[in-house]
Amino acid sequence: MREWCRLVIFEADTPAGKAFDVSLIVCILLSVCAVMLASVDPVMERHGSLLTFLEWSFTLLFTLEYLLRLWSVKQPLYYMRSFYGLVDLAAILPTYLSLMLVNAEYLIVVRLLRVMRVFRILKLIQYLESSRTIMKALRASRPKITVFMFAVVVLVVIIGSLMYIIEGQENGFTSIPASMYWAVVTLTTVGYGDIAPHTSLGKSLAAVVMIIGYAIIAVPTGIVTAELTRGDRSTTTLSCRNCSAESHPDGARHCYHCGHELGTSSDQHADQT
């Protein structure tokens, strides 16, 4: 029974597994819609009891799903500490926490917990194969992007300092931090316009910063795209029966996370029967 639950919940290459995934996706979308409708006062006044009933129904359903996931894997702590395990836990905790925060001074916190239920939509990530490829590319790009962001910070400090010297406090650049704020807004091509240069030299520097901003936007995109191209490889739908890790390369025999033997789909179905 435990192995059958694991195959249904974690595997996607069986009819039961596909039906489970589709049903869970529908429940996630409906629960998020219910949370958003609950934030509309007229709707809450007319259908508050129905929305409350739906919220608790979804919470109990996701709680049962979370407990079954913990029960079906051999090493539940691996799953609890994983990204998807934390997301699953975050999807059910706010509703239970709202029961303990009933005093008037905590009403704002309860409202925040209600809004946090929207993060249930993060549970959809584990059912989108392409999202795993993107997450791998982002992790592989992290060192390069970190260096790039450090260079941008240095550039912002230099530009902000120069603009503070050029424009001065009389033109709205009251301090170096305020000038750095202007540099960030201009470099990212947002352009709020609350602070703007008035001198010819300041406008010339602003034009240069705008041009640099367009070039900077393309850098992280190129880094991530290169990693996506380099890391484009097919993966198996098998999940580790020991720690529930997924996205193993085709032909992998052991889990990349815990080293447990994966086997094949036929092996797992044979074990099930």
Image (cartoon, rainbow, N blue to C red):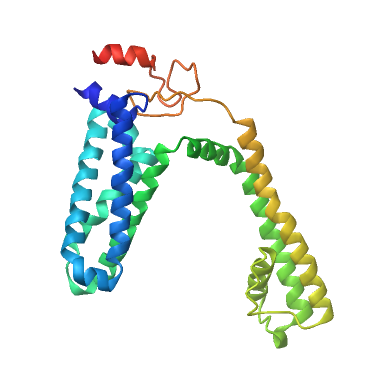
Residue 140 vs 54, above or below: the answer is above
Residue 113 visible in rendering: no
Residue 231 quadrant: top right
Q: Nearer the viewer, residue 185 or 159?
A: 185
Seen at 80% across and 71% down, the residue is 205
Q: Is residue 189 left or right of residue 39?
A: right
Q: Position of residue 77 (x, y in %)?
A: 30, 33
Q: Nearer the viewer, residue 226 or 170?
A: 226
Residue 163 quadrant: bottom right
Residue 181 quadrant: bottom right
Quick one: which residue is furthest to the bottom in this view? 170
Q: Is residue 188 left or right of residue 47?
A: right
Seen at 74% across and 67% down, the residue is 159
Q: Quadrant of the C terminus?
A: top left
Q: Position of residue 200 (x, y in %)?
A: 84, 80
Q: Position of residue 36 (x, y in %)?
A: 32, 62
Q: Position of residue 75 (x, y in %)?
A: 29, 27
